[in-house]
Structures are given as C-alpha cells and as structure tokens.
Image (cartoon, rainbow, N blue to C red):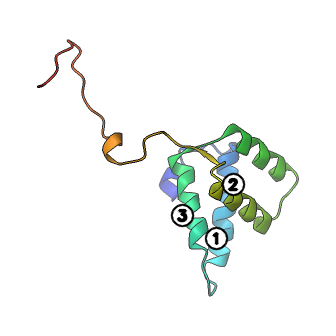
Amino acid sequence: MDAGKSLLTKRSVAYKVLNRLEKYYAKTANGMFPDDELKTALAFVHKYHMKESARDVFLRQLKCAIGDEDLRELFMRYFKEDKLFIKPEFESEGDMIPTLICSLGLVNS
C-alpha cells in the first residue's frame, strides 16, 4: 500500500484518513479476527477519488478529533453505502484497455 500512498498529498483528507486507518488496521491485525473488510476498503483509496461530500464530512470529523474506532465505522458506513468514492461508469477490465485511434480517421475493418 505504500507505493500508492505517495500519489496522495500529505495535506489531503484522503491521505490523513488512509494514514489513520492503516495504523488502526496494523494495531488490530494481530488480533484473533483481523479486519479484512477494512483492508479491502482501504485499497479503494488508491484507486478512486473521494467524493467532495465525503471529503467535507471526514475533514470536519478529523478537526473534531474523532477516535480511530469511530473513524473506521464512519469510513465503512460510507463505503458500504457507496458515498465515499467517485467510480467511473465502466467497471470491467475490458473497458479499461486503452485503444489507439488513428489521427487520420482511418478505421481498421
């Protein structure tokens, strides 16, 4: 997860939330029941942009010094309700393959 973290600025809300929740996950991962659901949701932070409304809510909560457990619950609630990330309309891997379009307007038939 560290490779993608460098793409987020340290001042961004997504970086702050990701950093706090990764530390929380590291503390709880050694327990009897590791939180794999949280780990899966954290992977989306690197993949998609956070919605503006979610960013505002998390910024407000971070300023109010929300606890790690409450931050995790808020993050997971927004993730499950699909209020957290802006996802593109296409989701399959085939749609994400870029295609080369000839600048002359020629089409391979």
Quadrant assignment, res 9: top right
Mark 1 in CB contact with mark 3 (< 8 angstroms): no
Q: Position of residue 32 (x, y in %)?
A: 62, 87
Identify the residue position indicated by label 2 in the image. 78
Q: Quadrant of the C terminus?
A: top left
| 60 is higher (above) or lower (below) than 52 | below
* Disc 2/disc 3 C-alpha distance (Å): 14 Å
Question: Which numbered tag is attached to residue 25?
Answer: 1
Q: Earlier in the sequence, mark 1 or mark 2?
A: 1
What amino acid is at disc 1?
A: Tyr
In front here: 50 or 3? 50
Which residue ends up furthest to the bottom in the rendered image? 32
User: Is 83 left, or right, of 41 in this rendering?
Assistant: right
Q: Position of residue 24 (x, y in %)?
A: 69, 69
Q: Earlier in the sequence, mark 1 or mark 3?
A: 1
Identify the residue position indicated by label 3 in the image. 40
Q: Earlier in the sequence, mark 2 or mark 3?
A: 3
